[in-house]
Amino acid sequence: MEGLLPVRPRPYDGELFTSWLMRLAHANVQRLPFFTRMLTGDANFWVHDADRHLRPDVVEQLAAATGVTPERVEALSLRAFEGRLFPGFQPRSLPRWVLPLYKKGYLRERPGVVYCPHCLREKLYLRLHWRLSFMTACPEHGCELLDACPRCQAPYAPQRNDLGFGQDWSVQPEPPFGYCAACEADLRDAPTRPAAPALVTLQAQLLEALRCGVMPWTPGHEVPAIEGFDVLHQLLAVVVQGDMEAYLTRTCGHEVLQAPPERRNRAFEDHALPDRRRLMQRVTDLIEDWPQRLIRACETARVYKRPLMVNFAAAPAWYVAVADQVSRANGRRPYKRTPLVPHLSLEELRAELQAAPTARERRRWEILCHYHGVEEALPVAQALGASRELVFRTVSVYNESGPDAMRHHQRGRPNPRKRLLTAEQEADLHAAMQRVPMTYEEMADWVERRVGKRPCASTMWIYRRGAENQSREGRRARQ
């Protein structure tokens, strides 16, 4: 497609990418499958999760057709949360906190997006944060969010109104966001219930953390947003364990999960919306008065360090310190923790990692970047696939000798302190050997008279064989 679209509605603040795309199709009186095929050239565009897999060519085509900058188009997708909610997208795995769509072609077997009837009544579009698994209550209206039609229980999937066997929604007076794709019920009239105030407060804090990049954890103490979200997701896995679930149900009055996922290795995103709401309420109580309430709950429910750490590649140091307080370690002494000497800041370490000329040197800086703030060799070794001894040795050398040891501690580089003979002396030795044949003892006497040290037999053999590279670089005299 070339040129601008006739009608080009601007995206709302916080709008979901597919929501804006559906509004574009409706404003230009085009059926959704024809519009996206004309715009992207992909007949299977809606088979995949377009909010997650937003291709660069689609971004450029939409920017050219609407006049919206590519950066603004990218900000409508789930990639807007990279670096704050999760590190990044992996090719074959769903990141934490993102609801899977459970798609089978155009159909959805389970809900993959939530909605608020009051928000749809005020302004008809999909909010970007409705794709996040921790969103179980509306931060604006204080009501519980929904993810299905209250009449027929079909999953909320507004694009199905204009896909497959759906009707031609382009001739309808408004976009299809407020209607059920199965029974055509008006979802803006769906009844709602008030949510727990503590849950609404927590979700407002989480949304603010996504915006500013830091999360208030305790009064007067903030942590990076991605660390806070990682810890919360880990605690959501802890509160479903048998003893911990029974403890929270008995002491805090939380409801039992109604429909836990069938698969054993379930994640928070696999739970149904009512159960996700119950789990968020449990975590809300658990992190209150941090960390005393968590430690008391772990000790009573006999939950020790391993469940608190099992999913972490490199846990934040402040969280590891709390997990250590409930560690049993089978009677073993805890691993030695060596603090990193602040020769360089974390930003300077990362700059050295980017500028490292060799793979071996990059490995050293990578170890130091991961070790910064963790100060424990084992989790860094597990995260990087290295041995604990390598991590400990790298940190020890860095602490003792500074950044230069990371840059120059490499075999094969010249080191004048290890040369036994200078280049001129070595040339004189070879010239003397050409004039008069020498035994090893005579060679050793010749060297000792000039440098004051008697060389070993290996060094004499190298000089006799003429291996110039090793004789200059590698062999030291016998003391």
Image (spheres, rainbow, N blue to C red):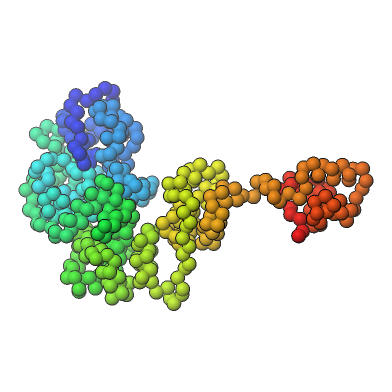
Residue 281, horizontal then vertical, whole percent: 20, 62
At horizontal 24% and vertical 52% (from top left) the residue drawn is 206
Relative to 280, 405 lies left or right: right
At horizontal 34% and vertical 35% (from top left) the residue drawn is 56
Q: Is residue 125 visible?
A: yes
Relative to 122, 433 lies left or right: right
Q: Is residue 229 visible?
A: no
Quadrant where the N terminus lies? Answer: top left
Vertical arrangement, residue 229 with respect to residue 42, above or below = below
At horizontal 76% and vertical 60% (from top left) the residue drawn is 479
Q: In terms of depth relative to the viewer, which is nearer, 325 or 122?
A: 325
Please identify the quarter of the rendering in which residue 315 is found.
Answer: bottom left
Q: In terms of depth relative to the viewer, which is nearer, 447 or 151?
A: 447
Relative to 427, 363 lies left or right: left
At horizontal 86% and vertical 51% (from top left) the residue drawn is 446
Residue 105, horizontal then vertical, whole percent: 27, 44
Residue 96, horizontal then vertical, whole percent: 31, 53
Please identify the quarter of the rendering in which residue 34 is found.
Answer: top left
Residue 447, horizontal then vertical, whole percent: 83, 51
